[in-house]
Each structure stands twice: as structure tokens, then as C-alpha cells.
């Protein structure tokens, strides 16, 4: 029946629907604005499907719980916002090091600290990349509308399983709380990546950190037929701690390269009239909605604007951005922070002096008018 | 007596001596390699001086405890390493937002996660900048030898008090654990910045977040004669929560600008033969020791090498780096990570393609030989 | 029958097959690793065809023997490795001066001196150019795989006959000893250049050093109908010694220009995706196999790498290299020595500071991983 | 008595006098024009002093004989010309690999091959660098007048002993055969470097290839109290063959770096009015006599010419040449070959298009007039 296929929902609900679609088996969380609806809805939906929901005492416990559950073979997720995400940084580093597939949703509020709990911001982008200590890499995805958000959420699970890695789903409060239409995909519409389990039989040694020829590392459900070690320490292919320089070097390069060398496979983006754009907007999340509006309204007036909307923020799609920016006279990054993606764009273009920032940091949404004002200034036409 | 003035000590002991010299009044911590000696020594030394040491249940509690103690008027410090520093990110954001003077020592180990507890690394540089969520700024200092480390530790307290900000003292394991001579400064040798206390009298309203003309915000010892609010939420000059866009905008700009606009006052560095250097090494911490050795040995052979040693990593001294790098044909960042300061250097030079990385990520120290090998490759001479 | 057309052989066997295909009539040699199989196989194969094989007392005698045999009208070859090739330098100079067609195979080992007899190296490239005293020029060819090696060996004979010059076939141990498929060309598949014999009849003066209009010098089988002089001294068109400055000047220019002015005719090379390469690898011999692997694997990831594989090393194809390098941002010479072809590439490009060396000098093969590591450093990404 | 102190001699005699002054203990050689006088004179002079002279059957034997004699603790020398020097390339590589101090005099004739035995040329410069196979380095010295030649010959012995290396004394026929005044230095006037013998006592292991802290390798007279291995194979610190990659890598780098990294210590040169030279001549050997004459005569006319006269050709003094050339508008290399040092100069200057060649290749001496003609052409004033 069509009524069940078309929803009019908040972004947080979209995440719930998509996670269930992707096969979410376990959720642990601690409620925090503006992500609370995710936990709230899953508290009802998961048990209905015979899957597990647990509210933990805090965010640290939440991430630790889903790490454990993931090891037993389930697809797992937690959801939080800035302060909770800050608390998760140590366990996130553990999941990176131990290569645990999991999805961590962070619905950004204004920050730092408790900041502006109900106000939009995109200021946790750099934290999503650099929050845990030590050299590492991570996948962070985002979306600007509900149809994309559904697909990107499913993708988050797929990428987590493919690369045995935590994936951060980094939304902003506008996307999390706005309501718009969602055409619910049917089973089979979107591809799902399932846990790659080892083909090694019981009684044979299983190496949890021995890559296959294609670079992937098969897993064995913890508590099942194989015994193996999992640690946050630098470890060898059996999972046992090692301080051998070559083991350390190779493990670190593996953790980083498995993502950084596959940027082209991980990158998700959309583009709008970038081919001949003299002014290229680069944006993501809800900011990209305003940016797209500006592009469409200015194109109607004959101005050559285009939009590159990033859906994967990390690993940063350098080649893509360099290529698209190379054609434009002006590049304008539209985001709700002090220029976090701006710095990445500057780094990968030939002419950083042609890259500008259209931003907002006061807890209010960045509007098309605000972007247009900044475009005037950039072109030397003042306010 | 000379015997008391010259010490042969570990870097961690230097931090202890310098903190006491600076007037440390309260230390709370949880032991973790390779920082443990700091807590261990202070557990004995602070009570001897009638000051307070407390071992907390974990790193979160430790940072929270010193935040509280700082509010009561004491100079405070905690010390930890990667995993503990990750756990501190939320409270660190709180200290940034609430503008609490405190010193957080992080003696880096190999990471991510528990990683290589006893091995050298400098891979937490980006975390020190971006670990907490939300737009913010921070001061991070480091040093390559014990005499400098003493001065820099005193500076950490001075800067914390001057700017009402957490200061990260970001050492690496080599500096923390190596022993070398320290000529202990006498009282008065190094200037000390004391808490700026409000001149507002009891019975008059004290505004904890109302800047003086020079931008500094006087404090009032908590539990003293004034009552005021302290929060991690966006707040006004009374410390009361506000969601007003202008208040939010101005607070964020204040938190960032009070440091970023004073980079020239905050920057600490040393330079060695940079004037005519064709190859400029940029380094910090123990890596700078090897870099300096290479400079000196190559200068003896007539090669024009120079070294810019950064002692303040954040806010990043862009102008300084740009200036020094502008004269060199090759710029080589020497660090023990995958290129964290490298990225900052690349961002601020004219020719990022002339910036190279001499690094090590395998838990072994970067030696002069290793740097020389990489210099060979960079100059197109291969291995 | 197909069985006879497809061989699975060592590179040294390929040289044998190709030399026989080209019409080798006489081989003199002294066995030395890693070239020995060439002599060993020819000791059986040549007599079967009614042609001559002789093992000499040393390498000097070997080269002298084939020089004499060549004068009688036969296509000739010898084979050796580093130490033996060093011994041949005087006789090689004689062959250059007297313009004797001959092919000298040198299968490089690790050096200098007896060095590493069984280990791969490409460190005799400069010796192949500059081993004999006096201004001169020479042709040196190489190949990275057996199919090419067959063609290049035939070419060596063709070029020797065309230009009356010794041609050095400079292999490395990996190419010499590895086994892979060779599709044996059929007679007629590859063009053969036969000895250009004089049309001057018996009883008429034959001038051994009087060029035809096209610059080529016809030969007359020694011991045949003409009497003439052959000497290593500067000589006139009759072959008689002269100290006349113009004779000396013209002879030297002739010896050099006959090759250097025909670089475009002599140059053999292959290229892989050089058109849009941002990083251009320049390589040869077995190193080019690893280089090609890197290009292919990186292209699959979207990186713009290309490979220029040189098959003729001398005379150095300056114009070709300059042209291909002019399009690239990075040029990386891949070779197993301290940068011998590197220096030639640097000399002919606009921006020598953009030319790097990916090399190996420890007697182990340069692998794709090793090249990738060096590409990381060159791009400023460290280890 | 003064009569004995001032000689009027050929350059070859100067070499003899200087070798005896330096302490030559053993000479083995085979006569060849234009070096024959050296052997001839030493056949008389050495026995008079109770030292050894032996005429060998050829040049290979000659170099091998002095290598053996050097191992027994004597200062040794041989002398030859182009064809003989070509024959010595294998044994020269052995001396490089086994680190045998010895002096090889090559008095260049016209080449290649037997060439022009009695005519001047400087065309063996590149052979002196690249004649032996394998990566290696070498010292080659030359001089333009007898007083310098004496000092440079003594230096050849000093450098051979200091660096345990063969040193090539590369003269040209003009210097070898011309007669001019030599003021014979008295004992003590020139410093002498004596064999560095090991302080290891009998019965204790002596390591022939274990460097001291200053990089030098003490020797033990072969046949004396220590037994050790000497080989041309890659070897460890005991002199025993090894194929270990690290041993091979380190040995090769040692052999090359012990000279290339000490270019500033090895470089010998003279300069004439280079400070303000708009046209800088770079020359060596007898060519530098004509070059100096041009500089002096043109300076008298107010033209700003200068001369950089190289006395050490290898390792090539890149830094020196780059520095001196950087000040000049025109650089003109004056040499009697097709541009062998020219190529080195081009490689190390900023503007290779401003480097020109004034040369002669016809067996006649390059005169001041010839250089002046070429200067006219370079400056666009034609012939």
C-alpha cells in the first residue's frame, strides 16, 4: 500500500528507518538533544523485530556496548550529539584500532561544550576526523535531504561492514529535526553489505587481522567457534599485542590506507551544474539546501553558479574537489562553522586565494539570502 | 648550593619542578604511561608544600576536579596520555567554554587507542587542536629539551592565567622519559603570571564574562564573595545561558579570537641558522633534537640547512612559518606521525609542493640517519 | 607446431634464441654469473647450425675474438657481467674506433668489483656509456620482459650492422634469470639488417672508412678480395694512421655524430598512460616491471600515473624524455642504482627539482611497494 | 744548495719528484706514451732509495701489483695512459671495493682507443669517474703547472691514505711533457698523511672494515700480526663476503659517501678574479693555462673575466661551482674534449642555457686565440 511507502518524517526518523532497512541488530544509547528521537524510536522498533535496544548510563558505555555487540556478529549503531560524541572519542579510537564495524550518529548542535543544544551548527566536522588520539582515518557521511539521508544511512552500515571500521553519520540539527517526504525504499532497492565471516572452520586457527587478497578482513562471531584476541594495543594478525616496529608501521598504514587509498570508492557526492560554473559552491548537510537554492535562482538569471554537495566528508575527496574547483573562478564553501571544510578545500586547490567562506556561527540557519550577500562581497560588490 | 640547582632528571620531573615553580596549587590525575611520574612525584611534593594532590577514579574526573579547583583560585594541572586525553575531550570543551585556566599535560604514546604505551609518537597534535566538538581555539606547547621544557611549562601556567584558557602541554614519550641536565631556575628568574582577580567589591555585581578594556576577564574565587553562574552552554556576561544569535556569535568569536588574534604573543619557537637555509627543517619536541643534529652535522659539511623549532603548536604560528619557509628551497617537516604539522605548514606556504615530510610511525624514535635518508630522497638522490 | 613456438625460458635463453634468429655466426666468451647461460646454451646451439662457438681464456680475448670474426663478415656476440665488462673496456674502445659491428651482452650483477654476483642491480649504465677512454658514443639497449627482449636483441644486431658499431645489450640479473613466456617469432616476423658489403670489385681500391652518401660505411670481409688497414689509431679513409688535426677532428665527430645525430632512429621505448600523467615514472629493465605494476594499480584508484620505459639507454633519448616529462608534475626515475639515469633525466628537463629517484642499492629487487613508499615521501606524505 | 732546489723539468718528472717526496715505496707499471717518463725515472730513483720498482707484463698486472704492495703497508703508484687505463678498470673497481690506498697516474692522450698517442686531450675525464662497473665514487686530481702539480701529486697520496681509496692523477699530455721551473719543496714544507695503522694488538681481532668514530678505517700491514680477508665481493666489517641487503646497502653508501660527503675537504681549486666576473671561465689542466692568459689579457682591457681552475675533478665540487657561477652572466667551460666537465657544470647551475663550451678535439692544444674566438661567438659577435 502506497501509504506505507511514503512517509513525512523528521531526519532522525529517517535514520531509524534506514538503519532497520540495513539490518540493525543492536542499538545502545543515551539520549541527548538533538538526536534523542533516534533512541526513542528504536526503543520501540527494535524489540518488535526481536532485536536489542538498551539505554546505557552514558555515551562511553553506549559505544562500548555496541562494539561488543558488533563482535558477536550484529550490525550496530549508537546516536548522540556533541558533548556525548566528545565522551565517545576514546572508545571510538578503540573501534578504529580493533576494526569493529559500527555506526555512530552525531546530530550536531551549536558548540563547544553544551553550547546551543537546539540550534543548528556544523562545527563538529574536524572533531569527527581528529577526535581520537593517534594517526587514524575514519569515514564520515552526511546528507541534506531525507531521500539522500536514507541512502547514506544504509551506506554507513555498508561501509562499516566492508571496511571493518566505525562510520560517523554526521547530521546537523536542521536535517535531524526537519520534516519532509521520504519515499521508503523496498527491500532489494538498495544493496546491503553483510558481515564478511571467515570461511575458516572450527578447530582451525582463525586470524582476525589477516587480510584476504582483496584487503578485507573476515570476522568470526565472538563467542562462536574461534577463540581470538581483541585489543586496543598495537597487535599482530592474531590480535596479540606487539611492539615490533614493522608490525606497528604496517598496522597504522593499514588502518589509514584501507580508507584513504579507497577514497574513490567511499566518496559520495552530488553536483549541480558544475560543468561551466564560474562560481562553485561547495557545501553539505542542510547548508547545501540553501546553496542549491542560490544556484537555481541565479542560474535563472544567467549567472553561472554550480554546487558540489559532499555527502562523504571523510576521507576528504581531494581529487574530486580539486577537479571541480579547477574549472571555477570563485569557490565558495558554505557551512555553519568557522571554516572547517574550507580549510580542506583550500588545501587541495591550485589557488587557495580564490576560495571563500559563506558561513554562519550564531545558531541560526544559513539562508540563501545570507549566501547571496556573501557572494556580492566576494565579487567586490560590497554588502 | 649548586647540588640543588643542577638536576639530572626525566622530562616528567622537569614538568613537576616547573609546575611547582609556577605555583601549582592543585593536581588531580589518574596514572597512565608515559606520564605517570608526574602524578607520582606530585603526590609527594604537593603535600610537602601544603598544597593538594588527589588521585581520581579516571581521567574525566581528574579534569573536572582541576576545573573546580581552578575556579576557587588555584593554579591547577592534570597529566595523562592519549587514551586518557581522549576521555578528557568533553571536559576540555567545558573548560574552553567556561574559560577556566588549567594546564593539561599529555605525554604522547604511540596510538591510536592503547596503541604502544611505551613508544614515542607525536600523533596527538591534531587531537589537541580538534578533540572537543564545536568551533574553538586552544593553546598547545611542547619542548625538545629539559631547560626549554621548564620554561615552557611555566609559560603554560602563565598563558592559562593570561587568557583564561586550558593550555595543553603536549610532550612526547622521549622528552618525558629521557634524562638530561636541568639547571633549576631560581625564584624570579622566570616571570610568573598570577590569577587576575576582579577589583569588584563584595556586594557589587561581578560579571564573570565581561572583558576589561585589554580583553582579559578578571575572575573571582568561586565560593568567595561573589555569586555567579558557570556553564558549558552559550552564555552572556553574567554566565547565564542565552540562545540569542548575537550573544552566541560574539561568544564564539571571543573564544577563538582571544587566542588566534594573539598568535604573535603566544608563539614560542627557536631557530637555528634559518637565515640562509636552502633546506629548512620544521620540527618540535624530541624530533627537533634529531633535526638539530642533522643541521649541525650538515652545516659542518657546508650544506645550508636550518631548523625552525616550534614550541607552540596551537594556535599555529602561520606568519612565522610562512616567513621562514619563504626563503628556503626545500621545507621538511620532521615529526613522528603521518604529517599532522606538515598539513599546517603546507597550508601557509607559497609552494606546498616544496614541503616534505620526514617522519616515523613505527614506535621508534626518528633518528638523524632517518632524516638524512629522507633528505636524500627529497633531493632526488634516492636511498 | 605450437609447442615449439611458445617457450617458457630465462631471459638469457631469450638472448640466445634472438641472436640465432638474427643470424649470429660466431660467439666467443668466458663464463660469468649471471650471464653464463648464454655461453652455455650457445656452446650447444651454434655448432648444431654449423656456426662457431669458442670459450676464451678471459673476457679481453673474448671481445677481441669476436672483433676479428666480425671483420671476416660474421654477426658476432659475446656475453659477460660487470667484472668481465670492465676488462673489455679497452677492446670496446678499439671496436668503437675501428667501427666493428658486434653485440656485447652485459648482464649486470651488484657491484662494484665482484660485488654481489647473483643479485640484481642496474649500476653499470654509466660504465656502458663512459667505460672506454676518449670522446665516443655507443648504443646500449635493454628490456623488461622476454617478448621485448627478443625484439631488442634482434635490434642490437641490426643497429650494430647499420651503424658499424658495438652495441651493448645491458640486462639486469632479474631479466636474465627470470622465466616467463616467450612467443617465438617466426622467420620474417622481425626485420633483419644484414652486413652492408662494399660493391667495390676486386682489384679496385676499397676505402673502409669512406662513407656513402647516406653516411653508412660498407665493409669488405677481411681476408677476402680487398686489402685494407684496421687500427685503433686515428686514421684516414684508408684506415691508415694520421695525426692531421682535420682528420682527427672529423673522425671523432663522425664516430659521435653517427649515433648522437640519429637518436630518433635508434631510440626504442614504450609508454603507458603518459598522456595525462601527473606523476611520470621513467624506468627500464626489470625495474620497469615494478613501475608498471604501480602505474596500473594506482590508475585503478584514479591516480594519474604513467610510465616511460626506455629500451635504448644510449644515446640517451633527450628529446623524448624532455617531451614526456614536460607534462608531468612529478618525474620519478625508478632504477636499481644511485641515480645513473636520474642524472640524464635531470639534465634534460625544465625543472630538475621535480625529478626524484626511487631506487634500491642493496642487492634486492625494487618492488612496487618500495616505489609506492618513495612516491609517498616525494609527495610530502612521509613514510 | 739552491741548484738542487730549482728544477727545469717535464710534468712527468714532477710527478716522480713529488711521489718520492710523499714517500712512494713501490711502483709497478708498463710503459705507454705519454706517461713513460714516470716509469723510466722511477726505475732508477726507487732502487737508489731501497724501494721497489717493477715493470709488469701489462697494465692489469701493474695495478694488481701495487694493490698487493699497498696492503703490505707501502705507499704505491702506477702510471699509464688511455688504453692502459682502460685495461685497469676492473682492478680499479677492486681497489675501490677493498679500499686500497693507491695512486694511478693517467696522462691522457687523444682517444678513443690508441687514438693519438702523442697529442693532447682531456677526454678521459668521464672514464676516470665511470670506468669501473657498479655505483662507486673516486677522487681525480689534475693541475696546470709544475708547482701545482707537485702539490697535487703529494695530495693524491695524502687523500689515498686518508680515505683508503684509489686516487686518479689525471694529467694531459701538455702538462706531462712540457718543461718549466719547479721550486722543489723541502721536507716539512708540505704535510704528509701516513698510513693509519690499527692500534689493535696481535692476538686481538682486527676488523679491516670497521670505521673509527671519525669515519676512517685503520689498516694492518698484510702478512703482519693480523689475519683478515680482502675481497672484491660485498663484505662485512671482517672483510668476509655477505649478501645481506643491509650490509650491501651500507657498504655501497659508505664507499660513495666517504668521498661525496667530504667534497668540501677534498676539493682543490684556484680562482682568478671571479668576484666580479661577468664571464667566468671554468677550466683545468693545461687548458687552464690558456684560459688564464685570456683572463689576464682581457682584464687589462677592462673586460670582467674570471677563471675558476679545478684541480679536483672528482668528486665534482658542485657547491663551489654553483656558487661561483651564480655571479656570472656567461660561464664558459674550457676543455679539450666534447664537453665532459661542461655537463657537470650545466647540472649544477641555475641557468644551464648560460653555460658554453670552448673546446678543441683535434689533437692540437687549445690556445688563447681559440678561446677568444669562442667568446666572441657566445656574446653574439660572430666569428
Image (cartoon, coloured by chain):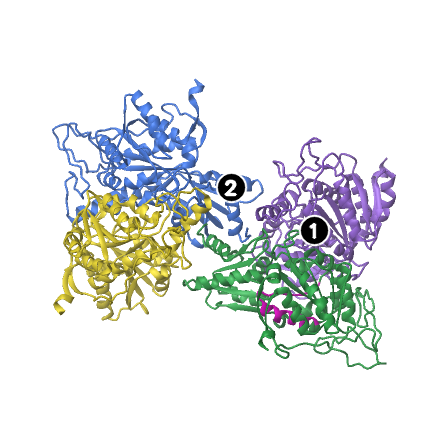
Chain colours: A yellow, B blue, C green, D purple
Q: Residues within 10 Å of mark 1 (few under 14, many from 20)?
A: many
Kindly identify which residue carries mark 1: D93
Secondary structure beneath label 1: helix
> Is D160 positioned to the left or the right of A116 in the image?
right
On whether disc 1 and disc 2 are found on a single subunit, the reply is no
Give the residue at the far front of this rendering: A203
Q: CA distance from mark 1 to mark 2?
A: 31 Å
Where are the magenta residues, as a range? C136-160
For residue D128, above or below residue A187? above
Residue B376: percent from left, percent from top: 54, 49
Name which quarter of the figure residue B158 lies in.
Answer: top left
Q: Is residue C44 above or below residue A18?
A: below
Can see residue D311?
no
> Residue C104 versus residue D132: which sits nearer the camera?
C104
* Residue to which mark 2 is pinned: B368
The image shows residue D219 at horizontal and vertical percentages of: 70, 38
Amino acid at each position: 500500500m502506497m501509504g506505507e511507502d511514503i512517509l513525512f518524517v523528521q531526519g532522525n526518523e529517517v535514520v531509524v528507518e534506514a538503519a532497520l532497512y540495513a539490518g540493525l541488530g543492536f542499538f545502545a544509547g543515551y539520549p541527548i538533544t538533538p538526536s534523542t528521537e533516534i533512541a526513542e524510536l528504536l526503543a520501540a522498533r527494535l524489540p518488535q523485530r526481536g532485536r536489542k535496544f538498551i539505554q546505557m548510563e552514558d555515551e562511553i558505555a553506549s559505544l562500548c556496548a555496541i562494539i561488543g555487540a558488533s563482535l558477536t556478529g550484529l550490525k550496530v549503531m549508537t546516536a548522540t550529539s556533541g558533548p556525548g560524541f566528545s565522551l565517545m572519542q576514546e572508545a571510538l579510537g578503540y573501534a578504529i584500532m580493533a576494526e569493529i564495524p559500527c555506526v555512530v550518529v552525531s546530530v550536531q548542535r551549536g558548540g563547544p561544550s553544551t553550547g546551543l543544544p537546539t540550534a543548528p551548527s556544523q562545527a563538529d566536522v574536524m572533531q569527527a576526523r581528529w577526535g581520537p588520539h593517534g594517526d587514524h582515518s575514519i569515514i564520515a557521511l552526511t546528507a541534506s535531504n531525507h531521500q539522500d539521508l536514507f541512502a547514506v544511512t544504509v551506506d554507513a552500515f555498508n561501509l562499516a561492514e566492508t571496511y571493518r571500521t566505525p562510520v560517523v553519520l554526521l547530521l546537523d540539527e536542521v536535517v535531524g529535526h526537519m520534516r519532509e517526504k521520504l519515499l521508503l525504499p523496498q527491500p532489494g532497492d538498495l544493496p546491503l553489505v553483510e558481515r564478511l565471516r571467515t570461511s575458516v572452520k572450527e578447530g582451525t586457527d582463525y586470524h582476525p587481522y589477516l587480510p584476504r587478497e582483496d584487503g578485507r578482513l573476515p570476522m568470526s562471531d565472538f563467542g562462536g567457534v574461534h577463540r581470538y584476541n581483541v585489543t586496543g594495543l598495537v597487535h599482530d594478525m592474531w590480535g596479540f599485542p606487539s611492539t615490533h616496529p614493522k608490525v606497528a608501521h604496517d598496522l597504522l598504514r593499514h588502518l589509514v590506507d584501507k580508507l584513504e587509498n579507497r577514497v574513490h570508492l567511499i566518496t559520495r557526492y552530488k553536483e549541480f551544474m558544475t560543468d561551466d560554473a564560474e562560481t562553485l559552491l561547495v557545501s553539505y548537510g542542510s547548508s547545501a539546501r540553501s546553496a542549491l537554492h542560490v544556484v537555481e535562482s541565479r542560474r535563472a538569471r544567467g549567472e553561472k553558479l554550480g554546487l558540489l554537495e559532499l555527502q562523504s566528508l571523510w576521507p576528504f575527496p581531494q581529487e574530486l574537489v580539486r577537479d571541480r574547483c579547477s574549472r571555477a573562478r570563485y569557490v565558495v564553501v558554505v557551512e555553519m562553522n568557522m571554516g572547517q571544510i574550507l580549510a580542506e578545500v583550500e588545501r587541495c586547490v591550485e589557488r587557495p586565494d580564490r576560495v571563500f567562506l559563506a558561513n554562519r556561527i550564531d545558531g541560526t540557519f544559513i539562508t540563501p539570502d545570507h549566501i547571496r550577500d556573501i557572494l556580492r562581497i566576494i565579487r567586490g560588490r560590497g554588502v
